Image: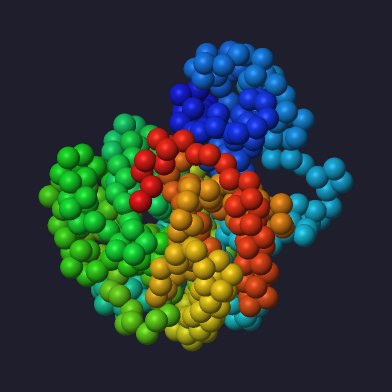
Amino acid sequence: MQISARALDVLLGGWRDRPTGPAYAALADRIRLLVLDGRIVLGSRLPAERELASHLGISRTTVSTAYATLRDAGYLESVRGSGSVARLPRPADPGPEASAEGYLDFSKATLPPAPAIIEAAEWAAHELPCYLTQSGFDPVGLPVLRQAIADRYSARGLPTDPEQIMVTIGAQHAIALIARTLLGRGDRALIEAPTYPHGYEALRAAGARLVPVSVDADSGWDEIELEQAFVRTSPTLGYLMPDFHNPTGQSMPVELKARVLELAESQGTRLIADETMAELGFDGTPLALPFAAHGEAILVGSVGKSLWGGLRVGWIRADRVTIARLANARSSGDLGTPLLEQLVVCRLLGEMDTILEDRRWQLRRGHDQLTRLLAERLPGWRVPKVGGGLTVWANLGEPVSSQLALAARNEGLVIAAGPRFGLDGAFERFLRIPFSYSDDELERGVTMLERAWAQVQRNPLPVDAQLFAQVV
C-alpha cells in the first residue's frame, strides 16, 4: 500500500504544534503514533522524502532526519525498490511470547474461550473420519453446519434454508468476500462512523469510495443523515452493525431498521448487516429479530465473539442467487473453510443458548465493573450506558486519544485510540474500552489508563482544530 504525501498530511494533523523540540522529532513522533494506532497500516510505503518535504513545505533534511529516527527505533524499514515501509520494532531477543510479555492487550474486544470448546473439539475429532473420503474443498460449507445455522435463524424469527447459508473463515472473510464480489472500483459504499475498522478496510480494498454516516454514542443513528446519504450518493453497498454496534454499543430501533431497508431498496443498495454482536445483549431486553426479518439484506455472523476468536468460522446468509455468486467468486481467494472447525461449531451451536446465557452474565458483570471503575478513577470521562456488546465508547472531553494510547503503552497497556474506528483522523475525543476481560484485568487496565491520563494532562499536546472538525 502506498500512502501519498497528501494523505499522510491529513493524518499528521497538528504535528507542527508541538511546543518544544526540533521539527524532525515532532514529525517522527506523529508518524510513530499513526503506526501504533493502525492508521498507517503495517507494510505501507511512506512518501519519498523529497515529495513529503515539498507537500509539507519543510526542508528535506527535516523529513530525512525524521525517517532516520523512525528507522533507528524500528518503525520504518528501507526496502530496495519500495522506499520506507512502516514496521513495528522487533524484540532484540524474541522468545515465544516476547512481544506480549508484560503488556495487557485491550486492543481486541474478545471473550475467553467458552469451556465447552474442549469437549466439542474432542467430539469433532471422532467425527472427522466420516468426512475423510471427501476432497475437503467446499466453497459453501458442510451441509450439517449450514442446516444448524439456518435452523438458528429460523428459531430467531427469520425462516431460512441451508441453501441461503455460506460458511466462511470468520466474519472478516465474509465481509471481504462480499465486498470484492459485489463492488466495482469507484462504487460508493455506505459505512457508519465510527465503525469496525477492518470492515471499512475491506470495502476500501475492493475499490469503494466510502460514504460515512455518524453513529452517536448517546443517540445512535441520525435518520435524516442516513436518508440524505442514500438519496444523494445511491451507494452500491452498505455496511452496518445495527445491533450492539462496534464501538458505540448502540442498537438501531426497529422502526429505523425498516426505514433503512426501505431507503436501500429505493436506491438499489445492497446492505450488509454485521450481526456478530447481535446475541450479546445483557440488559434483559428481548433478543432482536435478525436485520433481514425487516427487509432484504445480507447477514454476516460468526462465533468469534460469542465462543472464541480462535474458532475461525463465520457465515453469510443471503438469497440463493447471491450465495451462488459468492461461491463462484470465492475460489480466487480460498478453497473453503476447514472441516474440523466446522464440526466443532456444529456441535457448539446445539448448546448455544446455554453458552450465551453464561456469556451475557460475564459481560454484564464486566460492564458494571468497568463503568464503576471509570466513574471512580476518571470521573471527567463520559461513558454512555450500553445494553450489550463488548465495549464502551468513552468520551475523553478533549482530542487526545492517540496521545493517551501511546502513554498507556508506556504503562503496559495496549489499547486502540478512537481514530482507529474513524476516517482521516476523526474521533480523537473517544476511546474504545472493552469490558470482556476478567475482574483483575479490568482493574489493572483502568489503573494503567488512570496513570496514562495523568501523563497526558501534565504534557498536553496542542491539536490542529481542523483535523478534528468532524468530532462530535
Q: Nearer the viewer, residue 175 or 122?
A: 175
Q: Residue at x 84, y 52 (%)?
A: 95
View extreme (left): residue: 266
- Position of residue 143 measured from the top left corner of the image (x, y, whole percent): 42, 68
Q: Is residue 133 above or below residue 345?
A: above
Q: Residue at x 30, y 70 (%)?
A: 290
| Left or right of 103 in this view: 468 | left
Judge whether residue 138 can be spotted in this image.
no
| Left or right of 265 in this view: 42 | right
Judge whether residue 150 can be spotted in this image.
yes
Q: Nearer the viewer, residue 210 or 295?
A: 210
Number of numbered callouts drawn: 0
View extreme (right): residue: 93
- Position of residue 91 measured from the top left corner of the image (x, y, whole percent): 80, 45
| Left or right of 17 in this view: 222 | left
Quadrant hosting residue 258: bottom left
| Left or right of 418 in this view: 99 | right
- Position of residue 57 measured from the top left corner of the image (x, y, whole percent): 52, 16
Q: Residue at x 27, y 53 (%)?
A: 271
Q: Residue at x 66, y 15 (%)?
A: 61
Quadrant hosting residue 383: bottom left
Q: Nearer the viewer, residue 230 or 467?
A: 467
Q: Nearer the viewer, residue 327 or 180?
A: 180
- Position of residue 419 measured from the top left corner of the image (x, y, whole percent): 48, 47
Q: Is residue 336 above or below residue 374?
A: above
Type of colouring: rainbow
